[in-house]
Image (cartoon, rainbow, N blue to C red):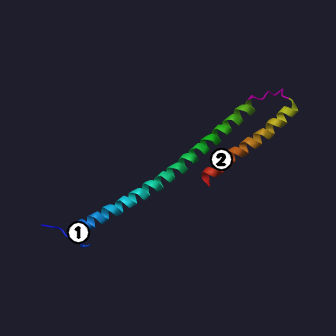
C-alpha cells in the first residue's frame, strides 16, 4: 500500500509536519533557555561579587586600629561608603 504524501491529511504528512514543528519549538526553547541561564549566571556572579565586597569592607573596617589617625579613619569611612555603594549597585542589577 502506498501512502499519498501530497495529501495534507495523510498520517505521514501530519507526522512530518508535527516533527518539524516540534524541532522548531525545541530549538526556540533551547535558545530561550540558554539566554535565561546566561542571565542567571551573570546575576549570580554579580551577587557573589557583592557579597565578597561586603566581606572585604567588614574585614577592613574591623581591622582598623583604634589608634589610627583621624585622617585614616575618615579615609576608611569614605572608602567604606564607596565600596558598599558598588556592592549595592551590583545587587540592584541582580534584582532589577
The numbered dot on residue 90 is: 2
| 31 displayed left or right of 67 | left
Mainly helix, strand or loop, the magenta region? loop
Q: Nearer the viewer, residue 33 or 53?
A: 33
The x and y percentages for residue 76 are 80, 35
Q: Secondary structure at mark 2?
A: helix
Q: Residue furthest left?
A: 1
Neighbor class of circle 2 (other Cα within 10 Å; few <14, some 14-19, many 20+) is many
Q: For the magenta stretch, what is the residue range? A: 63-68
Q: Secondary structure at mark 1?
A: loop
The x and y percentages for residue 53 are 67, 38
Q: Give me the residue at 61% from left, 44% from top.
A: 46
Q: Give me the residue at 15% from left, 67% from top.
A: 2
Q: Give me the residue at 81% from left, 28% from top.
A: 66
Q: CA distance from mark 2 to mark 1?
A: 58 Å
Residue hosting label 1: 5
User: Looking at the figure, which quarter contains the N terminus?
Assistant: bottom left
The numbered dot on residue 42 is: none
Q: Nearer the viewer, mark 2 or mark 1?
A: 1
Q: Please say if the residues under marks 2 and 1 sit with CB atoms less than 8 Å apart.
A: no
The x and y percentages for residue 39 are 55, 51
The question of residue 52 being in magenta is answered with: no
| 7 displayed left or right of 72 | left
Q: Quadrant of residue 64?
A: top right
Q: Quadrant of residue 63?
A: top right
- Vertical arrangement, residue 13 with respect to residue 34, above or below: below
Neighbor class of circle 1 (other Cα within 10 Å; few <14, some 14-19, many 20+) is few
Reading the chain from its start, which is encountered first: label 2 or label 1? 1
- Vertical arrangement, residue 31 with respect to residue 16, above or below: above
- Vertical arrangement, residue 75 with respect to residue 41, above or below: above
Amino acid at each position: 500500500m502506498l501512502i499519498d504524501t501530497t495529501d495534507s491529511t495523510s498520517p505521514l504528512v501530519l507526522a512530518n509536519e508535527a516533527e518539524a514543528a516540534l524541532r522548531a519549538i525545541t530549538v526556540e526553547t533551547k535558545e530561550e533557555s540558554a539566554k535565561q541561564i546566561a542571565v542567571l549566571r551573570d546575576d549570580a556572579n554579580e551577587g557573589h561579587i557583592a557579597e565578597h565586597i561586603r566581606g572585604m569592607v567588614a574585614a577592613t573596617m574591623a581591622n582598623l586600629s583604634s589608634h589610627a589617625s583621624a585622617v585614616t579613619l575618615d579615609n576608611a569611612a569614605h572608602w567604606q561608603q564607596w565600596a558598599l555603594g558598588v556592592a549595592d549597585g551590583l545587587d540592584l542589577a541582580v534584582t532589577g
